[in-house]
Image (tube, rainbow, N blue to C red):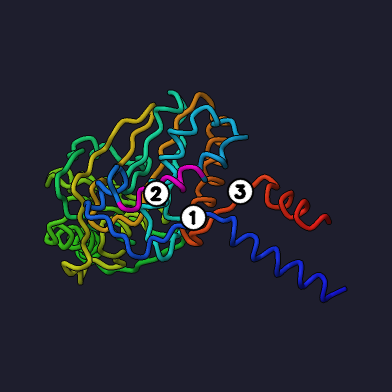
Amino acid sequence: MHQANYVLEFQAINRIKEISISIDKSDTQCVATPSVHMYCTQCPLRAFRDLLIKCASTSMSSKLIHSEKPFFANMVVNAVMSLDQEELDESLIGVKRIPGGGMQDSLLIQGVSFKKTFTYAGAEQQPKQFKDPKILCLNVELELKAEKDNAEVRVQQVSEYQAIVDAEWEIIYRKLQLIENTGAKVVLSKLPIGDLATQWFADRDIFCAGRVPAADLRRVVQAVGGSIQSTCSDIQPEHIGTCGRFEERQVGGERFNVFEECPKAKTCTLLLRGGAEQFIEEVERSLHDAIMVVKRAVKNGDVVAGGGAIEVCFRFQHRI
């Protein structure tokens, strides 16, 4: 009995190999630039891309977005192909939901985009658009904080107290000056950037954003280069990234920080639009399914029909 099952399994595997669609992409290379390659109509990988689009479209056939399959299938394939083709880490595809508008208003950002974080009044005076800016990513708090509860400092005279206050101000001003010396025009931090630092940056035409989610900051580093710094005292040129264009853009009722034309773009962002939050959530789930299907197809290179077609084929062949 076990031998019979082994024979059937062996036959099934061989049959799958016979009927699978396989495309060899090992000896093909597109001569287009990375930003143009995703939309190249004469690329040697066009046949493979068409196969991926069919896979993505098929996975959307029973979803709410089936009426917009061509639009979203292209978006999904472009998103997966923008990743590192060895790792294919789908977590680097950011998804942001923006209620309002129609599904066709959804965007694919070849880079990073995240919702504008909480800012103080001075942020409105900062520039909102840069070309080829230097970008510094930090894990540093740039804020004057009040003393903790039950903190106690004993001094003998007023001058000693003033020295403590001056030292606190000197520390944060030293950090800000070190950041300015790097030449960075966009400063991002996972930790808060207070009103003092915000106004200080605004006076020097520097854009800053604090409380940036860790996942978004990680994707920024993947796209622009550099690394996240936990100190301001030893920032080297290799720690700083760059992109072709940065801007704060209005999308629907929200404002987003958008990094485009990134030289090391191994990540992307989907900005999903729709009439209601629940509908956009369903769109996101549908696109996640399609992304996983395309990712598997890219890794494997072989595709077979789904929906139980293979099982039916085996049943008729072996009369099980």
Task: Work out whether residue 279 or residue 75 is closer to the camera in this orientation and state it.
Answer: 75
The answer to whether residue 50 is seen in the rendering is: yes
Q: What amino acid type should be assigned to the residue bearing mark 3?
A: Ala
Query: With 157 as the anchor, is 145 left or right in this view?
Result: right
From what the image shows, is residue 130 above or below residue 71?
A: below
Question: Of label 1 and label 2, which has the lower sequence position?
Answer: 2
- Residue 162: percent from left, percent from top: 21, 61
Question: Of label 2 and label 3, which has the lower sequence position?
Answer: 2
Q: Residue at x 20, y 44 (%)?
A: 245
Quadrant location, the N terminus? bottom right
Q: Residue at x 14, y 59 (%)?
A: 177
Please tell me how crowded label 1 is: few (under 14), some (14-19), or many (20+) other residues with Cα within 10 Å. many
Residues at badges 1 and 3 in contact (C-beta under 8 Å)?
Answer: no
Calculate the distance from the C-alpha at mark 1 to the C-alpha at mark 3.
Answer: 16 Å
Report the number of numbered marks.
3
Instruction: Please report the bounds of the magenta region as a residue range.
Output: 44-54
Identify the element where label 1 is drawn. Answer: helix
Question: Of label 1 and label 3, which has the lower sequence position?
Answer: 1
Q: Nearer the viewer, mark 1 or mark 2?
A: 2
Please tell me how crowded label 2 is: few (under 14), some (14-19), or many (20+) other residues with Cα within 10 Å. some
Q: Which residue is mark 1?
A: 295
Query: With 170 as the anchor, is 313 left or right in this view?
Result: right
- Residue 147: percent from left, percent from top: 38, 58
Quadrant location, the C terminus? bottom right
Q: Is residue 60 magenta?
A: no
Q: Which residue is mark 3?
A: 305
Q: Which residue is mark 2?
A: 47
